[in-house]
Image (tube, helix red, strand yellow):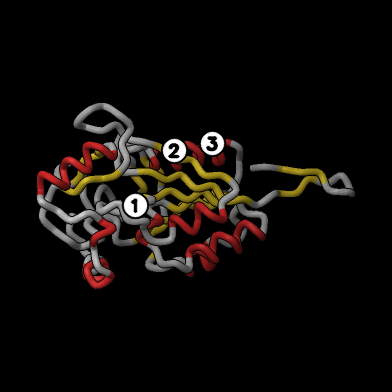
Amino acid sequence: MVMTDNLSGERRRQGRIEVVCGSMFSGKTEELIRRMKRAKFAKQKVEIFKPSIDTRYSDEDVVSHDQNVIHSTPIDSSGNILLLASDIEVVGIDEAQFLDEGLVGVCNQLANNGVRVIVAGLDMDYQGVPFGPIPALCAIADEVTKVHAICVKCGALAYVSHRLVANNRRVLLGEQQEYEPLCRECYQKALEAEGATHPEDDTEEDRQTATAPSHNH
């Protein structure tokens, strides 16, 4: 927690928003867990939240792909965070791309009240389109960390999570059977091989259709 001296010499907390974003398999959740555990070690009051639809590894725990675990509170909407985070010094939010746009205002309010907010999430969906509240959170964040997976085709830094299964729903929970990290060049080659349209060629109607949520794993 960042601390500063005020005029009376007392110490006060300085609220801030930290965003950790990138493609799947890039270590976002791993970094979130690391920062939260450091805060707990420093005897700070912490609480971590995740969307209730994310039940891939656990209904309640936040679990990284490397099986690191930290207990969390599942929520259905961003507004629940304000109700549940009273008297908390550090708030963590995993898979934030699945939450509503109100998360931006919630994070701002928490930070303005002196809370350190750490948000992890996908910055783009499988079509390379900015995902949920993450882009807006990056804009207002005090610090943005973009992490990268490694392209499974060529070993370069990955750019996007390429979906391997035929499903045009935007929200499709999955793992390595459903997604692979690809660099920009290999992603374009994959799209050409599939005969797929590029994201910028999609109509607005197509994108709306693709946002229907799914609880498939």
Instruction: Name the amino acid, label 3.
Output: Arg
Q: Which element type, helix, strand or loop, lies under badge 2?
A: helix
Tell me the residue at 22%/46% (across/down). Answer: 162
Q: Are marks 2 and 1 in contact (CB under 8 Å)?
A: no
Mark 1: amino acid: Met
Q: Quadrant of the C terminus?
A: bottom left
Residue 177, x across and y down, in percent: 14, 43
The residue pinned by badge 1 equals 124
The residue that label 3 is drawn on is: 38
* Discs 2/3, front: 2
Q: CA distance from mark 3 to mark 1?
A: 28 Å
Q: Is residue 209 left or right of residue 194?
A: right
Count of labels shown? 3
Q: Which residue is mark 2?
A: 31
The secondary element bearing badge 1 is classed as loop
Position in image of residue 119 (x %, y %): 47, 50
